[in-house]
Structures are given as structure tokens and as C-alpha cells.
Image: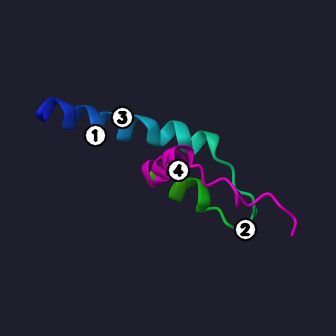
Amino acid sequence: MINFLYGVAFMYLFAMPFLYYLATPVDEEDTGAPTSFAILWPLAALEVYYRILIGDNDDDGTSSS
């Protein structure tokens, strides 16, 4: 069990710089967005998994109406 937790911690810390490098802010004035995403990426991943399993793709934020 402890090896699993070490693996989780390692993957969390290992992915943070990678995701910080990948994320670019949409608004040039909001420079904290990549940092927030790099720290909170597990929550974003859980939301994606939830939407895949439940099938809640009606409001994905891409519609103009």
C-alpha cells in the first residue's frame, strides 16, 4: 500500500512541471492560470473521467448559445 502512495506522489510531482510547460494562459493578464492547472491537474483528470463514464457531454463550453 505504501508503494502505491509513493507512486501517486511521484506521478503528481513528476507531471506538475510538464503540465506547467504545456498550459498557456488564454488571457495574457492572467499569468497564474498555468500554475493553477499544474497544481490542480488531478481534479481536471477526474472531471474528464467522470464525463466519459457518465456521458455528460451536452455542455462542453464550446457552443455559442
The answer to which of marks 2 and 3 sits earlier in the sequence is 3
The answer to which of marks 4 and 1 sits earlier in the sequence is 1
Tell me if residue 38 comes above or below residue 21 in the rendering.
below
Residue occupying image coordinates x 12% and y 35%: 2
Which stretch did the figure color magenta? 40-65
Separation (CA) of disc 3 from disc 1: 6 Å
The secondary structure type at the circle numbered 3 is helix
User: Looking at the rendering, which quadrant does residue 30 occupy?
Assistant: bottom right
User: Looking at the rendering, which quadrant does residue 26 occupy?
Assistant: bottom right
Q: Is 3 inside the magenta-drawn segment? A: no
Find residue 11 and name its label.
3
Q: Is residue 36 left or right of residue 31?
A: left
Give the percent coordinates (x, y) of residue 21. 60, 40
Separation (CA) of disc 2 from disc 4: 35 Å
The answer to which of marks 2 and 4 sits earlier in the sequence is 2
Give the percent coordinates (x, y) of residue 27. 75, 63
What coloring was used for the rendering?
A: rainbow
Residue ID for mark 4: 54
Residue occupying image coordinates x 16% and y 29%: 3
The answer to which of marks 3 and 4 sits earlier in the sequence is 3
